[in-house]
Amino acid sequence: MGRMVDAVNSGDRREMLDALLMKIAETLDKTDSGRDVGALAIKFVDVLDRRDESEPDNGKHKKEAVEVTAFETITKRRSERRKTAQA
């Protein structure tokens, strides 16, 4: 079985996030498409943040809470553009 399937079968969320992060990193290394690199980079950062959030806080890495995700920012921009276009 593959690393992703093994991680899912383990039921360990951290292991699943690590496997997904590695899969995205491997795909990023293999692609030359600018469009794909941009989308994969956004996903990579999102998975990395989720993995870091799942770590217990031992005081080493203090991270401020992110109030707005990239998805929310993009959605807001699209909505504003649509309102402007309709006016």
Image: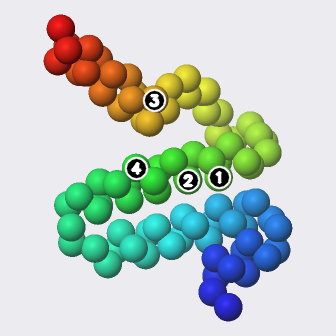
Residues at badges 4 and 1 in contact (C-beta under 8 Å)?
Answer: no
Q: Residues within 10 Å of mark 2 (few under 14, many from 20)?
A: some
> Which residue lies at the image location 82% right of the left edge and 67% below the top edge?
11
> Closer to us: mark 3 or mark 4?
3
Q: Which residue position holds label 3?
A: 72
Q: Which residue position holds label 4?
A: 42
Tell me how far mark 4 sits from mark 1, CA to CA.
14 Å
In the rendered image, the vertical position of residue 37 relative to residue 1, given as above or below: above
Q: Amino acid at mark 1?
A: Arg
- The reply, left or right, for residue 31 in relation to residue 57 is left
- The reply, left or right, for residue 39 in relation to residue 54 is left
Tell me how far mark 1 sits from mark 2, CA to CA.
6 Å
Mark carried by residue 47: 2
Q: Amino acid at mark 4?
A: Ile
Residue situated in front as seen by the camera: 21 or 4: 4
Residue situated in front as seen by the camera: 13 or 55: 13
